[in-house]
Amino acid sequence: MEQPEQNVVAQTETKMPKPAALQDTRPSEGAVAGPTGAEVFKSKNVSIYYSSFRAVTDVSLSIYENEITAFIGPSGCGKTTVLRTLNRMNDLVPGARVQGEVHYRGASLYAPGVSPISVRRRIGMVFQKPNPFPKSIYDNVAYGPRINGIRNKAKLDEIVENSLHQAALWDEVKDRLNKSGLGLSGGQAQRLCIARTLAVEPDVVLMDEPCSALDPIATGRIEDLMREIKSQYTIVIVTHNMQQATRVSDRTAFYSVLRDEKSDTRTGVLVEYGRTAQIFEDPQDSRTQAYVTGRVG
Amino acid sequence: MKADPASPAGSADTLSQQRPLGDRGFQLLALASGLLVLVILVLIAVTTSQQAASWFSTEGLKIFTNNWDPATNHFGALSFIYGTALTALIAVIIAVPVSVGIALLLTQVVPYRWSRPIVYVVDLLAVVPSVVWGLWGILVFAPWIQHIYASIASGVGGIPVLGALFGPPTSGPSFFTAGIILAFMITPIVTSLSREVIATVPQIDKEGAYALGATRWEMITGAVWPHSQGGVVGAVLLGLGRAMGETIAAALVIGSASNVITTHLFVPGYNMPAVIANQFGEASGVFRSALMGLGVLLFVFTIIINVLARGIVERSARRKRGA
Amino acid sequence: MTAVAAPQQAPDLREPKGWRRSKNRIMTVLMVIAFVLTIIPLGFVLFTVIAKGASIISWQFLTGSPIPPNVLPAGIGGMWPAVLGTLLITGLATLMTVPLGILGAIYLNEYGGRNWLAALIGFMSDVMTGVPSIVMGLFIFSIWVLHFGYSGLAGAFALGCLMLPVVIRSSYEMLRLVPDPLREASYALGATKSRVTLTVVLPAALGGIVSGALLAIARAAGETAPLLFTILTVTQANPNVFSGPNTSLPSQIFSNATQPYTGAQDRGWGAALTLIAICFILMIAARIVTARFTRYSR
């Protein structure tokens, strides 16, 4: 049983030995300033292989409770791959292998005997392209609770309404819960997927570039949503959009690509990880600086 | 056409020529070959109806009575229509769960490497010709299953519904035996069509279900099935059409008993294609016309079912593309 | 709703209790059973045919002439007329149908485009694959046999009607896979459409087209119903496929299957084995052609 770690800021955030004495001075809306909460995830020396190809190498970081953590970096740097190790979604890819340790609230995610189903019930995921099921809006949201055994109609109604409220979608769809989920606009469909994810009452919500297929207004609504639910969930978001990272996240992890000239392969690495303000205003690594100042894409 | 002063002398003529004759000829040839399909279908309808005309006119609506007796010039074909529907239904009830099960197995459960050999085996079922199924059916399968029928029948003798279906009398060559053999024969096509449909479910939908903590079966019912139900329904209808028209295997194992309309499944009976196959040789006059007429009915039924089936498959594919 | 930040227990990440796991397992088992349920009859049939037919088959069997059904032993009496008939009639049907089918597919893919006629032809061609084979036999009986008598040719027509939509559909799928840049390169050199199709598109799709044709032939070789009223099963060999009744392996099997004499039945098994062997060889050939000679596949 692990004690919640206090004041881990100095210890685990950055790779450089510089003291991270910078305060979190960014006045982001709804961000919780002050001491961090429990350590929800702890990855140690995680490398991910697809058959013999090493996609990501030696990633170590911690994710903290009730924070929004952003993974940023250029294409192909493995940020989505790392995200998917947190809910065992890489299991779906034949030949995928995870080396190293990933702990969720003290329990190892990859220990023998761990059921991916139990893992994913606690750690939900929202995808890049909204993927509502070809069912009614109600059935989409009720799907999760139903497979977890909740059959009582009144209880399901309550869960569906709550989830849709949390996803800021209730008012728009409350009169057409029986209509197909496929008929929604992109932004609405994504909020439906978020509602669906929240309906199983997860602990963590992982988001893989959730706004990349949406227009700016829809993006803004989802970002507002994220800030609102932050106090109840822990969120990890992969994003291509640096401004989004600065807008919503408390911490940011910057990944990049290591190119091996000899074998002509590219491997993802975690370059720097720290409070968002620090990453963007005072990056310690030159690669981070090059990326966040826009010198490299 | 006027020569274009801007282009080199002599070339303007070639540019303005019509397409060479050979090219147009080829196009016409291709068009004619395509039209052949429509022409044949129309000719089938016309010529067989002509041949069947005397049956329709002499019997009129009596063709739908259960009284087939060529010796006394009675040609009521209701029992054959019944038999066709019954055997096709039995075949579909048996084949569909099996076929859909295999299709799901291949697309959702089995790693890709293993799916090829499994597909080969299922396709092998299709290679066995109808007449060989019939030969095996009548000489090996029917005598063997007769014993099973007998045991079942003695077991359910008095029970209300079961007795009516499975009670005595029993016979190896029967409606049910024909249904089973037909099921074997339509499994490959229903499986392969279902597989095609199920394989088009987008990976991201499946991941969405898994991400909610679903087991594989829950993922199938939640994400795969809603996508593929239209296509699978179409595949089932196509299997039904096939089962209705399959002639030789049915002719050999159905028992060749006319005028049988009953709830009992283990009794000998007849269906449309089988009676045509078995009795056409000695038929003439109105008798032959009646058999032709059965052929016309068969043609119409299968065309309707096939149009419906293809339509359903088209529509669900279109809806998916649009969504 | 979620775990609090205060001292926490490590979460229990084992399988959820209850029926969910069992249900998943049961369903998987049922799917496997479905597959096994198809292997059993297949194995049974193949085993019986091979076991009973192997002892009958010999060179004499394949090339000798038949004897009356009630004569034993099965060692005497051959299937030559049926073998000859199958080869001739199926061969003739192939010669007539395959070129027409390919041309039809060429129309659909290269010329038809999205116009209503092509859509109709494509749709009705698929519908035609569902027309029972016995109806094809009745059709040719009405339109040909009544005027010109029974012949292998009539049988070939009937088989051809069966094969045509199958060849069209499979050839069409293969033509569709040929990438457009190939055509465009040829057009850019000034070739006419027919030339492009014949010299570039067709050769590129040829492997797949041949494979599809082989499968259609395999199906036709095994058909009995269309031949019942068109060739009028006889027992004498008839090399003249254009006139006079004929016979074929499936027809022979059909008539032998209904004989009460074991001699005839045994010969039926022998013929069945021969027929399955032919269909099987054609299927293997189709697979080999697909594997080796197809440039563009799905």
Image (cartoon, coloured by chain):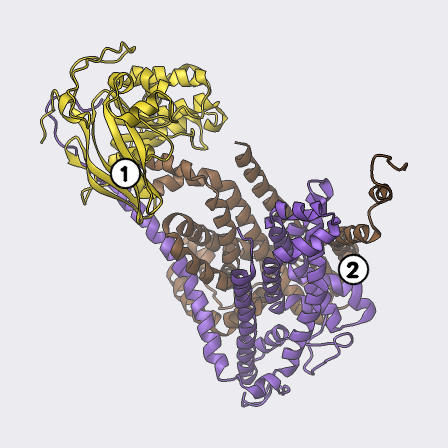
Amino acid carrying mark 1 in the image: Arg
Amino acid carrying mark 2 in the image: Gln
Check disc 2 and report the residue beneath it. B51
Residue A238 image point, x, y percent: 33, 27
Check disc 1 and report the residue beneath it. A88
Residue B291 visible here: no
Colour applied to chain A: yellow
State whether residue A167 is above or below residue B115.
above
State whether residue A132 is above or below residue C78.
above
Q: What element carries label 1?
A: loop
Callout 2: 10 Å neighbours few (<14), some, many (20+)? Answer: many
State whether residue B140 is above or below residue A27.
below
Q: Are marks 1 and 2 in contact (CB under 8 Å)?
A: no
Task: Name the side, left or right, on which B295 lies relative to A86.
Answer: right
Q: The brown chain is which one?
A: B
| Dot 1: chain letter | A
**Which residue is at the far right?**
B2
Task: Name the side, left or right, on which B137 lies relative to C243.
Answer: left
Residue beneath the point at 55% across and 85% down: C263
Q: Which chain is purple?
A: C
